[in-house]
Image (cartoon, rainbow, N blue to C red):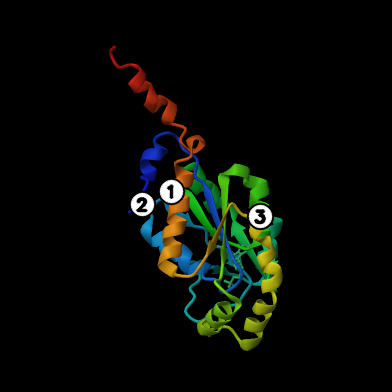
Amino acid sequence: MALVDVSELVAGRRRGLMLVVSSPSGAGKTSIARGLLARDDGITMSISVTTRPPRPGERDGVDYYFVDPPTFEDMCQKGAFLEHAVVYGHRYGTPRAPVEEALAAGRDVLFDIDWQGAQQLREAAGEDMVGVFILPPSVEELERRLRRRAQDPEETVRYRLAQLASDVTHWAEYDYVLINRKLDTSIAALEAILTAERLKRRRQPGLGAFVEQFRRTPG
Ligand code: 5GP
């Protein structure tokens, strides 16, 4: 159950917010994002398009839309992406249409994208975007998690570890920073961020009309 009922906020013709979660690879952002989605039915996950081959168990249309490079390029040319970037040697992009539909309907959208995508969304969306950066508790723990995933070849793990130093430099571009020590605590923290952002005055356009009823009380 969400702490704030989004359907009530929608009554005030609320526009949805864009919750962007980024982190170095292996910091646990995907698990945190999944945890939030399971607890809150007012937020929808944006499913990205990628040229990366699927990992074992990943499903097309659920984890990503897996496409070949010419298809990705064609989508790019047609302006089908809200943002796109090369990450760890593959192309990734956020399809524009589902996001715009959800936001217009007053639903919030969750993005698991890298710092390049977050920068592009910030430029396009300004204050509609809320950025959360997730850090691992230590280098050792990050390496353990990357290896435990055990789905990527050793060279991929090493390449992603090598990117850590430059990935973390982007923490200061985000509104919130979480150190992911314990999954449950991190999910609760992300839920708290979402709740607070939903309750911001400027995100409740129906408030003026709601408050009006109290001004009409007798006496
Ligand atoms: P992975 O290959 O491990 O699923 O993702 C690699 C990185 O690409 C992660 O940091 C993830 O957040 C990022 N990513 C996934 N989808 C997108 C997207 O649509 N746009 C951008 N800019 N980054 C993405």
| Residue in the picture at 42% in, 64% down | 185
**The furthest residue to the top:** 219
Closer to us: 56 or 60 = 56
In the image, what residue type sits under mark 3? Glu
| Residue in the picture at 43% in, 55% down | 191
Whether ligand 1 has any atom under 8 Å from the Cβ at mark 2 is answered as no
Residue 114 visible, this orientation: yes
Q: Can you tell which mark lies on residue 173?
A: 3
Q: CA distance from mark 2 to mark 1?
A: 8 Å
User: Which residue is denoted by mark 2 in the rendering?
Assistant: 2
- Is 3 left or right of 28, judged from the image as shown? left
Looking at the rendering, in which quadrant would you find the C terminus?
Answer: top left
Task: Look at the numbered discs 2 and 1 and tell me whether their residues touch, using CB distance below 8 Å.
Answer: yes
Q: Is residue 61 above or below residue 158?
A: above
The total number of labels drawn is: 3
User: Which residue is denoted by mark 1 in the rendering?
Assistant: 195
